[in-house]
Amino acid sequence: MKRIGKLCACLSVLGAAAAMAATPDWEALGKRWWAHVQYLADDKWEGRDTGSAGYEMAAAYVTNKFKSAGLQPAGTDGYAQPVRFQVAQTDESESSIALTLETKTQQLKLGEDAFFNPHADGDATITAPAVFAGYGLSVPELKYDDFAGLDTKGKFVIYITGGPASMPTEIKAHYQSRDERLKALKKSGAIGTGSIPNPKAAEVPWSRTAGARLEPRMELSDLGVAGEPSLPISMVFNPAHAENLFAGSGHTFQEVLDAMNADKPLPRFPLAVTIRARVKVKTSETKSENIIGVLPGSDAKLSKEYVVVSAHLDHLGIGEPVNGDKIYNGAMDDASGIASLIEIARGIKESGAKPKRSILFLAVTGEEKGLLGSRYFAEHPTVDRKNIVADLNMDMFLPLFPLKYLEVQGLNESTLGEDVRAVCEAAGVQVQADKQPDHNRFIRSDQYSFIRKGVPALAFKFGWVPGTAEEKKFNDWYKERYHGPADDLSQPVDLAAAAQFNAILEKLALRVADEAQRPAWKSESFFKRFAQ
Ligand SMILES: [Zn+2]
C-alpha cells in the first residue's frame, strides 16, 4: 500500500502545541479506517458476493463493530434484516443472437458482439424486426419522446444509453433508471430490447463489461418490491461492433455517434435486420441481509426521526480473471464506505455527541445487483418510513488524493445541499456539483432507493479540477480498477484524506440530526414529486 498523503509533514511544521491539540491526527484516524477496509476486502471473503459465505463473514464483522460503537440493533433479527433473492444466470451454451438481413444470417459471438441481461422469469426465443429509438427515452414533462412516430410494436427496440446534452442531469438520470426505461419500452409495445452503451460515458472497457455477463443476476423475491417486471429479452450490444445492427438501414452507427458528439438530436428509424434471440436461464434462490444499527436520539420528540447514513457491503464476488486474479475485492467499492460507516459511528461515540434525532447506520446488501438491499429496506423500513428524514450515502467516494474538493450528487435538490456546504466550508473543503452527469451517479447507488420514496439524499465523491493530475487519477481509477480485481488492497489511497472525509460526514450527520427543521426538497427539484 502506497500513500500519497503528506499530512505528518504539515503537522510538524505547525509547531504550536495548541494547534497540534486542535488538529486531529488524520494519519492515525486514516489507519483505523483502512484496517476495516483491509478486513472487508481480504481475499478470503472472495469479493463479498450477495448470498455468499464471504458476505456473511463481512456482515458479522460489521455487526460486531456496530455493537462496539454502542449502536442498538435496528434490524428485524437483531442487527440483521434478511432479504431473499431470485438468481438468474445465462446458459450461453443454449443461448444465441442472430441478425438476418434479407437472406443472409449472421450469428453474433456472445461476449464479443453482445450478451444477454438474464432475469428470473426464464427462457425466451423471439424473432422480430428491430428499430433504433435514439436514446430510448420518454420524458413527459419535457415533451421529449424518442418513441414518437416510430413503429415499435412487437419489435426489438435498440437504443444508445445516455440522453441529450440539453436535458437536465437529474431528469436524464431518472428516466434512464431501470423501472422508468421499462415503463417507456412496454408502453411502446416493444417485445425485447437491446442497449448500446454510450462509448463516450464508458467507465470500463467492453471486455470488463462483457466479462461480468455470466455472473449471477438477482431480483428481489418479494414481488411487491421487485419493481417493473423485465421484458422477455434484454440484450447489450458492443458499441465497437454495432454497425452490424445498422446494415442495410440507410443509416450507420457512426452517424448516430456523430450526432451525439455534436449534441444534435439522434436519428430514429427502422433497422433492416431481423433479430432472432434465444436465451436460456438457470435460476435459483439465495438470501442475504442488510445490517442495521441505530444511535438513539436525545430529544424526546425528534428522536423518533432518523437520519440514515448508508453504504453497501456487497461486491461482485468471483469473476472473470484479469491478469490471473479472479477475486473482485471491492476495496473502494464499497468496503471503503462501510469502513466510513463504522468510523463515523465510533467517532460520534467517542466525541460524546448526543444528537437530537436518531442516526440509523445502514449497511446494505445487493447494491451491485441493482440497489436491491436498499430498495428492500426503503420498501420495508425497520423504522417508520415517514420518519426517515435523510439519506447520506457513501459509495466509492475515492480518496485517491488530498481532500480539497468534495463533489456532491443531489447538491442542488434539497436543503441538504446547504448543510454539506456549511460543513465543508468549516473544514476548508470546496463543494462541487456533479461534473460528469453522463455517468448518472445520482441514481446509480443506494441513495436512489430513498429518493424514490421521497427522502432527500446526497452522495459523494472526492472532487477535482479539470485538467489536473487529480482528474487523471480519478479517471484512470475507473479505467484500471472499477469493477475489476484491481480494486483491491494494493492500490494507492490517501488515508489522511479518507479520515477527513469521515469527519465531514460525521459532522454532516450530526448537523442534520440536530436541526430544528427536517430536510426538504427544493420546490424546483425534479425529485420533489416522490415526497409522500
Ligand atoms: Zn459497484
Image (spheres, rainbow, N blue to C red):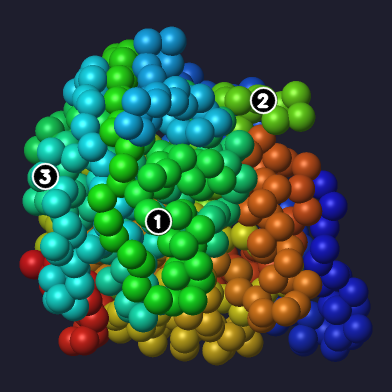
Residue 83 screen position, x and y as percent: 26, 31
Residue type, label 1 = His
Q: Secondary structure under badge 3?
A: loop
Q: Amino acid at mark 2?
A: Pro
Q: Nearer the viewer, mark 1 or mark 2?
A: 1
Percent x, y of residue 241: 53, 41
Of callouts 1 and 3, the N-terminal one: 3
Q: Say which residue appears at 26% left-offset and 31% top-offset.
A: 233
Ligand 1 under 8 Å from disc 3 Cβ: no
Q: Earlier in the sequence, mark 1 or mark 2?
A: 1
Quadrant location of residue 475? bottom right
Question: From the viewer's perspective, is residue 498 above or below residue 270?
Answer: below
Residue 251 bears which disc, if any? Answer: 1
The x and y percentages for residue 511 are 39, 78
Please tell me whether mark 1 or mark 3 is closer to you in this view: 1
Alpha-carbon neighbours of circle 1 within 10 Å: few (<14), some, or many (≥20)? some
Which residue does the image show at 82% across and 63% down from the upper left? 4
- Split into 4 quadrants, where in the image is the C terminus? bottom left
Q: Residue 242: x percent and y percent?
A: 48, 44
Location of mark 3 (residue): 153
Residue 36 in the image: above or below residue 303: above
* 2 or 3: tag closer to the N-terminus: 3
Find residue 144 and report its image quarter: bottom left
The residue lying furthest to the top in this view is: 93
Circles 1 and 2: CB distance less than 8 Å? no
Q: Given contact means CB atoms under 8 Å apart, are the residues at marks 1 and 3 in contact? A: no
Distance (Cα) linking label 1 and label 3: 21 Å
Q: Secondary structure at mark 1?
A: loop
Q: Residues within 10 Å of mark 2 (few under 14, many from 20)?
A: some
